[in-house]
Amino acid sequence: MLKKITIYLISFGYVWIGVRHFLNPDYFLAIMPPYLKWHLELVYISGVFEIILGIGLLTKYRKYSALGLIFLLIAVFPANIHLVISEEAQNAINVSREAAIIRLPFQLVFILLAYWHSKD
């Protein structure tokens, strides 16, 4: 029962965050590491994947969607690191350095949740 509830919650969460990549790309652009190119394109691509993989959690392709989310979470982790080290990024999205640091371990929680959902 808990697994089913979390599948619906994280599915909704990923779809909602994915949609936000299109509604408010500036938020995501603000935390993009400067060493990456094509910032806006990467924001849109990650948004598309969040939507597709989030929906995929509710289908017979749950295992593949969950594994895709693990890769996506690893791929976007540099943005979370950049948020911790960049005062400019913190100011842009109105978050403290401490809050940015607290966010980091949640990536691991989301990876573990996705891994759990990749199993039958």
Image (cartoon, rainbow, N blue to C red):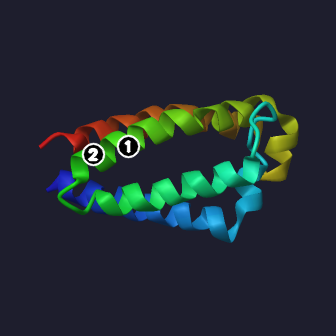
Q: Which residue is mark 1?
A: 68
**Residue drawn at 58 percent across, 34 percent down:** 77
Classed neighbour count for the residue bearing mark 1: other residues with Cα under 10 Å, few (<14), some (14–19), many (≥20): many
Q: Which residue is mark 2?
A: 64
Relative placement, left or right, of 19 versus 38 is left
Quadrant where the C terminus sits is: top left
Element at label 1: helix
Query: Mark 2 is on which residue type?
Result: Tyr
Q: Compared to 48, does 92 lie above or below?
A: above
Q: Nearer the viewer, residue 23 or 40?
A: 40
Quadrant where the N terminus sits is: bottom left
**Residue drawn at 48 percent across, 54 percent down:** 49
**Do labels 1 and 2 touch, CB within 8 Å?**
yes
**Residue drawn at 34 percent across, 35 percent down:** 112
Q: Position of residue 90 (x, y in %)?
A: 80, 43
**Residue drawn at 64 percent across, 32 percent down:** 78
